[in-house]
Amino acid sequence: MARPRIAWLPGDGIGGEVLQATRLVLDESGFEANYIPGDIGWEFWKKEGTPLPDRTIELLRHTECAFFGAVTSMPNVDAMRELPEGLRAKGARYSSAVLRIRKMFDLYTCLRPCRAYPGNPGNMREGIDITIFRENTEGMYSGAEWDKIPLELYEVKGMERVPRQAAITIRAITRKASLRIARAAFDRAADTPRQGAASDPARTGICPEKRLVTAVHKANVMRATDGVFLSAAREVAGEHPDIGYEEMLVDTCAMQLVRDPLRFDIIVTTNMFGDILSDLCAQLVGGMGFAPSGNIGDKYAMFEPSHGSALDIAGKGIANPVAAILSARMMLEWLGDKDSAGRIGRAVADVIREGRVRTPDMGGKMGTMAMATAIAAKLKKGT
Ligand code: ATP
C-alpha cells in the first residue's frame, strides 16, 4: 500500500497530549504514513476569527483521511468575549470546526464503539460491547438557528404556537440521510458476528447468536422528524430479515443502557441522541478515556477520540490515551491495514487486562505516555 497522507490535527487541551501518545503506538505498529500537521482550535479562533482556517480545509482536501484530537467549544456569548475587538468588528462568528468538517466532507456516519475491555476497573459490567451509529450531518445539529426568530417565519402555519421572544434551532431529518445511516448500521451487522455477551435470552427474548439493531427515536413527540427516521430504519430492516431489529424511545434507551447494557448490540440513531447516548455508553466501559470514534463518509474520514479537550486535566500528562489509540486502530481498518489494526487492538487489550499500567481515570497514578509506552512495548514484543 502506498503511504497514505493523514492530516494530523491535535487541536486544544488534551488533544495534543493524546495524539503524541498515539503516534508512539502507530510508529511501533509498523504502519507507515505521511502525517501532515494542521491548524485547528481555539487559538485560531482568537488569532484569526475562525477555529478552522481555510488552509486546514485545503489540507484535508489533499489527504486520504484526518486524525483529530479535540477542540474546546463554548457557547456563543463566551466565544465572542474571547475574540479581539478588531475581529469582532469584522463580524466573525464562532462555529464548531468539527461540525463544519463533518458537513463539508459529508462524513455521515459517526461510528462509536464502546467495548468493556476485560480487566478494566471502570467497566460497569464485563461483556458490554455496544456500537453506536450516529447520523452525523443533520438533525438538531443542522446549524440552522436564530437568536431571534425572523418575522417571515411567522407566516408559516403552526408558528403561532412559538413565543415571539424565542430562539430556535431547526431539527432537519431527511429520508436520504436516515436511509444511509441505517444502511451503515445493518451492513456492519451483516458483516461481523456479535462480540459482546447478551443478557438472559429467556427474559429479553434476544437471541445471543443473532445481531440486533436498535433504532432509537422520539417519534411519539417529534412525529414528523423521527417519523422519517423510523420509516427509513424499518425499510432497511426489511431488507435484512436475518438481523434482529427493535425500536426504542430515547429516554427508555438511556434507562435500559444503565439497567441492562448487555441487551444492546448496535444502536442507530439521529445526531443529538447519538451524541448523548454515546457518552453514556462510554461511561459504561470506563469513561471518555475508552471511547474512540470515526466520522466516515464515502470518500473521506476523520478519526478522533470521543472526548473533548478536557481542560480540567490538560497540561498534566494524565489523560488516558486509549480512546485516541483505539481511534487510530479504527483509522487503520478504514485504510485497509487490518493486520496493524488488529495488533494495536490486542496490545491495548493485553495492557488493560494485565493491570500494571493504570491512568488516574482507572484509579491509578500513571500518565499518558506511560500507557502509550506500555502499549507500544506490547507491539514491539509481537502481540
Ligand atoms: P470540551 O469542552 O472540549 O467538550 P469537556 O471537558 O466538556 O471538553 P470532555 O473532554 O469530554 O468534555 O471531558 C469530560 C470529562 O471527562 C472531564 O472531566 C475530563 O477530565 C474527563 N476526560 C475526558 N477525556 C479524558 C481522558 N482521555 N482521560 C481521562 N479523563 C478524561
Image: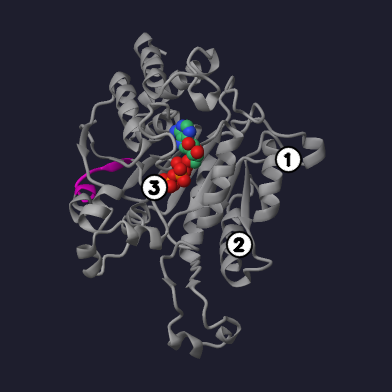
Badge 2 vs badge 1, beta-carbon distance below 8 Å = no
Disc sitting over residue 296 in the figure: 3
Where's residue 40, x and y in %?
27, 47
* Nearest the eye: 46 or 287: 46
Kind of residue indicated by mark 2: Leu
Res 376 quadrant in image: top left
Badge 3 vs badge 1, beta-carbon distance below 8 Å = no
Q: CA distance from mark 3 to mark 1?
A: 31 Å
- For disc 1, the marked residue is 259
Q: Earlier in the sequence, mark 2 or mark 1?
A: 2
Give SS at disc 1: helix
Closer to the eye: label 2 or 1:
1
Where's residue 118, x and y in %?
59, 21
Q: CA distance from mark 3 to mark 2?
A: 22 Å
Q: Residues within 10 Å of mark 3 (few under 14, many from 20)?
A: many
Kind of residue indicated by mark 3: Ile
Q: Is residue 192 at least partly visible in the picture?
A: no
Disc sitting over residue 230 in the figure: 2
Residue 258 vertical placement versus 167 (above, below): above
**Could you tell whether 76 is left or right of 28 in the image?**
right
Res 39 quadrant in image: top left
* Nearest the eye: 377 or 197: 377
Q: Residue furthest top?
A: 381
**Label 1 CB less than 8 angstroms from ligand 1:** no
Q: Earlier in the sequence, mark 3 or mark 2?
A: 2
**Could you tell whether 46 is left or right of 214 in the image?**
left
At 61% from the left edge and 35% from the top edge, which residue is drawn?
A: 284
Residue 96 vertical placement versus 128 (above, below): below
Quadrant showing the C terminus: top left
Kind of residue indicated by mark 1: Arg
